[in-house]
Amino acid sequence: RALFWASEKGYGRAVDTLLRAGVNPNIQNSDKETALLVASTNGHLGCVIALMACSQTDLNIRGRGGRTALSFACGGGYIDITMEFLHQQDCRVGEKDDSDATALFWAARGGHTQIVLLLAQESTIIVNHGDKNGRTTLSWAAGDGMEDVTRALLGLQGIDINLKDCSGKSPLLWAAGNGCTAVVRILLQDKRTDTASTDRDQRNSISWASAGGYTDTLRVLLKSGYPGADDRDIDGWSPLAWAVQNNSPDTVKTLLESKSINLEQGDHSGRTALSWAVQYGHPEVVKMLLAAGANPKSKSKTGTLVSIATEFG
């Protein structure tokens, strides 16, 4: 316990004294943590150096979530500790955790650009490696809105900017779906980006931005010139239908202003955006659709607009 306490508090001399007294540096507590994991997680460089100086210390023991001390140091943004690990011949830099993420993933998700660039120079790091969901480091950086990290990753040799995860989503789709407007701009400025990319449900970036009600992101996508504002997904849903479901008048307005929306085209059940807006009880959106020319007498398998309004109150 004394070694864990000293490592957590950052008492490097105490750690050194305990190790010289023969304390085992690799003992794990109930959370699977070792002293090195604790010191690295809390950013205590002196403790890390003292532990590394002990020949018995295992640098690669996996703690919570299967993560190593290097993984925690990178995720915490501790560049000095990260460099100490990279100088150790026994450190397995490309080690995967329980989710198949490497230290590079955690550095990227934390927005630690310098550490990302350091790790990318290591021969055991595969920049296009995907985790258990197939998401790459770039996918996570883009989806988390990490602008600087995204730029850094795009500059790496061999980076696949359009690599999709298990659901078919590319970094652009993740950025659009999370409303990361600045990252969307960065990706669109890169000529390698497939702006027409769709996921396994045939949803494009405009669909994802519309569903989230991210109007600013949507405007950027529409200005890029990609003609996907009215594309249907696997269920026949258009970006407008997704915007209606989200009850986002601004998003609906932006789509209508694109002048490329077919208001009368229904989904696979024959229902139009107006039909769904009536069912959801979104009066402002209903007014906007009617003003844009949507047919108030449209009918689907569910019924007329009046019958739908009556049924769903």
Image (cartoon, rainbow, N blue to C red):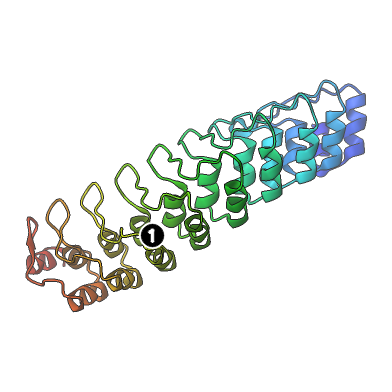
Q: Quadrant of residue 214?
A: bottom left
Mark 1 Cα-neighbour bin, 10 Å: few <14, some 14–19, many ≥20: many
Mark 1 residue type: Ala
Q: Is residue 43 visible?
A: no
Where's residue 108, x and y in %? Answer: 61, 46
* Residue depicted at x 71% and y 35%: 70
In the image: residue 293, left or right of residue 36? left
* Residue depicted at x 29% and y 59%: 239
Residue 214's place in the image compared with 67, above or below, is below
Location of the N terminus (image quadrant) = top right
- The residue to which callout 1 is attached is 209
In the image: residue 71, left or right of residue 247? right
* Residue depicted at x 25% and y 66%: 260
Could you tell me which secondary element the residue under label 1 belongs to? helix
Q: Residue furthest front?
A: 191
In the image: residue 267, left or right of residue 79? left
